[in-house]
Image (spheres, helix red, strand yellow):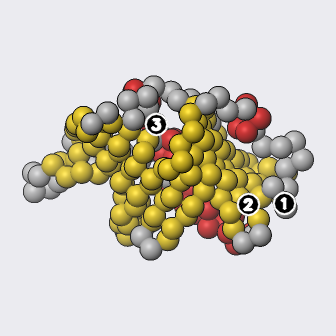
Amino acid sequence: MKTMLLIITAIALVLPVNSAIASECVKYGKPSYSANRTVKIGPKVIRSKVFVSGNKLREEIKRGNGTEVRIITGSSMILFDPVGKTGVKFKSRKPPKRPGELRLAEKKIGKNIEISYLFKAKNGDWVPDVRTLCTSSGIPLKRQFVVVIGKKVIRATMSQSNIRPGAQSASLFKAPSDVKLTSR
């Protein structure tokens, strides 16, 4: 279980705190829902159950006989093992700035909206950096993005299925009081 928590911690360190929520969809609404989520980073596939309420997210990832939990709010991210009762709390950090000029493009696809962040490459071409498909109520359905680890650029996707809109309990977005957290 500790090894898996370390893998998720390593992935979390390269992603900004708000990236899991696909904040560009917030422009269309701040929904509350639960869903099944699949993230593919290169050959690695991570399946999880997510609970979202506005800018708060709880993600539960099954690993072997246990579950890892990641809670993201506007101010912090908490990763913990509910069985081992240990975890780590990270302060919010801003996403890294991309070099060069950025442009936002939106396109309606049926009842959904595709939002693309484009950046100007050295050769002058506009290249997609992040592409997100959102519902008109602000729920991200699919997101394509890149993860940079050191000098390695890895293409990644996030998709959600079995989406169930509805209020989520506030207790989902807090670590249980018996979990010992260290800060980073």
Q: Secondary structure at mark 2?
A: strand
Task: Look at the image and tell me whether residue 13 can be seen.
Answer: no
Instruction: Determine the residue located farthest toward the right in the rendered image.
Output: 178
Task: Residue type at mark 1: give it.
Answer: Val
- Report the amino acid beneath label 3: Ile
Residue identifier under label 3: 139
Badge number at residue 83: 1
Q: Earlier in the sequence, mark 2 or mark 1?
A: 2
Q: Is residue 86 above or below residue 18?
A: below
Q: Amino acid at mark 2?
A: Thr
* Secondary structure found at label 1: loop
Front-most of residues 68 and 181 = 68
- Of residues 140 and 19, the one nearer the viewer is 140
Question: Callout 1 environment at 10 Å: few (<14), some (14 to 19), or many (20+)?
Answer: few
Residue tagged 2: 67
Q: Disc 2, disc 1: CB below 8 Å?
A: yes
Tell me which numbered mark, 3 or 1, is placed earlier along the sequence.
1
Q: Residues within 10 Å of mark 3 (few under 14, many from 20)?
A: many
Residue 108 lies left or right of residue 89; in this view the side is: left
Label 2, residues with CA under 10 Å away: few <14, some 14-19, many ≥20: some
Are dots 2 and 3 in contact, CB under 8 Å? no
For the point 62% across and 52% down, the residue is: 49
Q: Helix or strand or loop: what does disc 3 sit on?
A: loop
Vertical placement of 151 versus 143: above or below? below
Name the quadrant containing residue 132: top left
